[in-house]
Amino acid sequence: MNTGKIIFSQVMDHLPMHTFRRCVQRYNGHYKVKRFSCFDQYLCMSFAQLTYRESLRDIEACLRAQQNKLYHMGIRSNVSRSTLADASENRDWRIYADFAQSLINTARSLYIHDDFGIELNNTVYALDSSTIDLCLSSFPWASFRSTKGAVKLHTLLDLRGSIPTFIHISDGKLHDVNILDELTPEPGAFYIMDRAYLDFTRLHVLTLCASFFVLRAKSNLQSKRLYSHPVDRTSGLICDQTIVLTGINSSKEYPDKLRRIKYFDADTQKRFVFLTNNFSLPALTITQLYKSRWQVELFFKWIKQHLRIKKFYGTSENAVKSQIWIAVSVYLLIAIIKKRLKIELSLYTILQILSVTVLERMSILQILTSSDYNV
């Protein structure tokens, strides 16, 4: 690595520029643009994510204070608040969504052999959503309740490496279960979900596509037991049964057999009932798979705490989606750098170090490995 480069430039060197240019061209991002390109916007917004800038005025002040370093950061135009606002308003957010998707593919290939705590060769996804509250008067397009606005991040997380493989940004009113219609089921993969996604018509589509699901059953489930399988009750398992649905509608929506597993968690003193269409894995492994769903909750907590996606630099739908997708791409970029440079530090620690050294002239590898950090 060239130690003459500032660290911000070294971080951005890991971006696939040919892919970014294709994304810009795909959505005609430079139509009538004479200066301040889409990449200039991306660099400014990435700088804001890495250094925790609070507003466009904050971004403008910080970058203007480092005017002599803008060229070395890759920014080829003057930075002003109005220019940033116009770019966020008018540059198609799909440019940054498609670019983030390319980074997702890169990150997944790097983390494909990572362990997530369960010995399983199949790909395992956790599906969930997180709500970001907004002021309805400032964000009238983000309808949620009569006096409250919100956007939802519907996320499919690959548990190997905690890489988001699918993200859909909607208003707060969209019910979680509708996102199942947007997914392309992967044969052999496991989809771990909570009860909000219990829709037997949609679950049967997963079965027809040779995908597996694990989710909690509702208390009013109408079913008939066909077989009971032996279980080790000392492990917390109560029963492992093969069932068919007997409800008037549910039996038509899901005519195949299902597996019902009841489990008592000694830590929480709660009893759980799981449904799955996988009949080959041990019952205890099914319960462990559902427990691993918590990783998607940790992902939401992490990005809300450490990236700027709760306070937005613009109020339009395009500005909000652009900011979220750029934030996601920064998360993915740090994950890629961590793997490529074989850094043992956590993503949080790497972000904290970069936030105060991003304009220094030294090797990024040196600054991330020169001291003993608390990972």
Image (spheres, grey):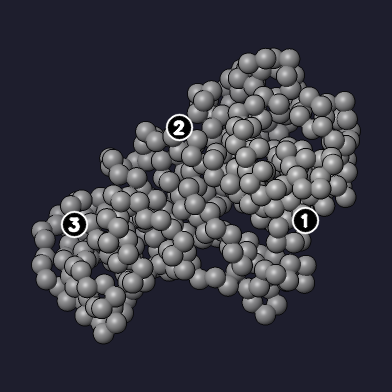
Q: Position of residue 73 (x, y in %)?
A: 76, 28
Residue name at image x 54 percent, y 70 percent = 174
Q: Is residue 169 visible?
A: yes
Q: Position of residue 257 (x, y in %)?
A: 19, 67
In whole angstroms, how far apart are the C-alphas of marks 2 and 3?
A: 31 Å
Residue indicated by mark 1: 89
Residue name at image x 34 percent, y 45 percent = 123
Question: CB atoms at circles 2 and 3 under 8 Å apart?
Answer: no
Q: Residues within 10 Å of mark 3 (few under 14, many from 20)?
A: some
Name the mark nearer the viewer: 2 or 3: 2
In whole angstroms, how far apart are the C-alphas of marks 1 and 3?
A: 50 Å
* Lower sequence index among marks 1 and 3: 1
Residue indicated by mark 2: 110
Q: Measured along the vertical axis of the image, is residue 151 above or below residue 165?
A: below
Residue 235's tag is none
- Left or right: 317 in relation to 109: right
- Left or right: 164 in relation to 312: left
- Left or right: 97 in relation to 57: left
Q: Residues within 10 Å of mark 2 (few under 14, many from 20)?
A: some
Q: Measured along the vertical axis of the image, is residue 89 above or below residue 123?
A: below
Q: Quadrant of residue 354?
A: top right
Q: Is residue 289 visible?
A: no
Q: Position of residue 356 (x, y in %)?
A: 73, 31
Q: Secondary structure at mark 1?
A: helix
Question: CB atoms at circles 1 and 3 under 8 Å apart?
Answer: no
Q: Quadrant of residue 352?
A: top right
Q: Mark 2 belongs to which amino acid?
A: Leu
Residue indicated by mark 3: 279
Depth check: 148 or 164 in front? 164
